[in-house]
Image (spheres, helix red, strand yellow):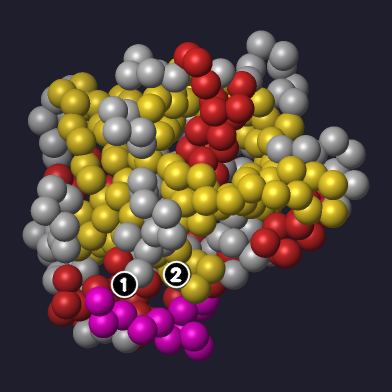
Amino acid sequence: MRRTFYTFNVFTDTPFTGNPLAVVVDCEGLSEQRMQTIAREFNLSETVFVLDPLDPVNTARLRIFTPTRELPFAGHPTIGAAVLIAQLRSPEMLGRAGLGLAIEEQVGLIACTVRRQKGGAWQGSFILPRLPQRLGEAPSTEAIAAALGLQPADIGFAAHQPSLWSAGNPFTFVPVASLEAIGSVVPNRKLFSKTFACSGSLVFLYTQEVMREGSHVHARMFGPGLAITEDPATGSAAAAFAGVAVQFERPEDGDHLLIIEQGFEIDRPSMIHLRLQIEGGVLVDASVGGAAVMVSQGTIEA
């Protein structure tokens, strides 16, 4: 059976940058095993399948697969799929006010907004389905440095120390002292999986030194546990990073915008917008957003 798919670059408005994504929309009769096979064939960090919602009041249901397994939640598939659904179903309603969508994922119901900016860029955002949670203790600084090919002195800056957080997927967050150090990271294959087993070998490195004016954080993400050598942009990590930012930066009450740049070291520049709402010194709401651009469309026999 021929099934329609689209490919997007997410967290960018420029084709062939950002994070690639495949979205399959004709999913009737597809088994979980078949979805996994299709995702392995596309061989992108994630492939998303758009299904009818379990609750008809909602917009759609998504299932998200890496080449090796299904994920309960992921950021760039949520944004890319939401932008496509809005384009296909309600293009006349897309304006600066935005179109709201209710997306079902395994992690829960996700409220998304899609709008078209002046100049033609499509923008998607979603409210975090769950606030970040602090997990256990991170590995030691010495173990982290050895696994990343760094020196212990390269780990940490200001109040920031390694930590474990999840907003749907667990990550080890590693603060790195400089842009030079984060750019020199070469993971040690023998040590990496063992050191970061606590987060399923998902590691998000970040520094406050940036490449692009206007950015607040420069990041890299390595995920060999998901068959991802290095991810160009990681929305689920940005979601969990909201907890990191609040813990170590102690922002004042009010709304805050953090712009995270990622993917520069692998020639896939990506810009992630993370919005935080703080009340009484506590994170009460957060959202992740960015642009998405369609690159191709076609059919696959599956």
Q: Which mark is residue 265?
A: 1
Judging depth in this view, the residue of 298 and 146 nearest the camera is: 298
Highlighted range, magenta: 183-194
- Is 215 positioned to the left or the right of 58 in the image? left
- Contact, mark 1 vs mark 2 (Cβ under 8 Å): yes
Where is residue 10 drawn, in percent x and y?
Answer: 44, 48
Q: Amino acid at mark 2?
A: Glu
Amino acid marked by disc 1: Glu
Rendering coords of residue 15 (x, y %): 42, 54
Q: Is residue 269 left or right of residue 2?
A: left
Query: Residue 39: x, y in percent?
Result: 70, 58
Front position among marks 1 and 2: 1
Circle 1 residues within 10 Å: few <14, some 14–19, many ≥20: some
Left or right relative to 161: residue 116: right
- Is there any visible trace of residue 157 in the rendered image? yes
Asked whether 43 or 95 is in front, the reply is 95
Q: Is residue 272 above or below residue 276?
A: below
Please provide percent x and percent y for residue 184: 26, 82
Q: Residue furthest front?
A: 119
Q: Which residue is mark 2?
A: 230
Task: Of the two numbered discs 1 and 2 on the same chain, state the one appearing first in sequence.
Answer: 2
Q: Residues within 10 Å of mark 2 (few under 14, many from 20)?
A: some
Quadrant of residue 177 in the image?
Answer: bottom left
Judged from the image, the secondary structure of the residue bearing numbered disc 2 is strand
Is residue 198 in view? no
Q: Label 1 vs label 2: CA separation?
A: 9 Å
Does the magenta-highlighted stretch encompass residue 188?
A: yes
Q: Nearer the viewer, residue 281 or 266?
A: 266
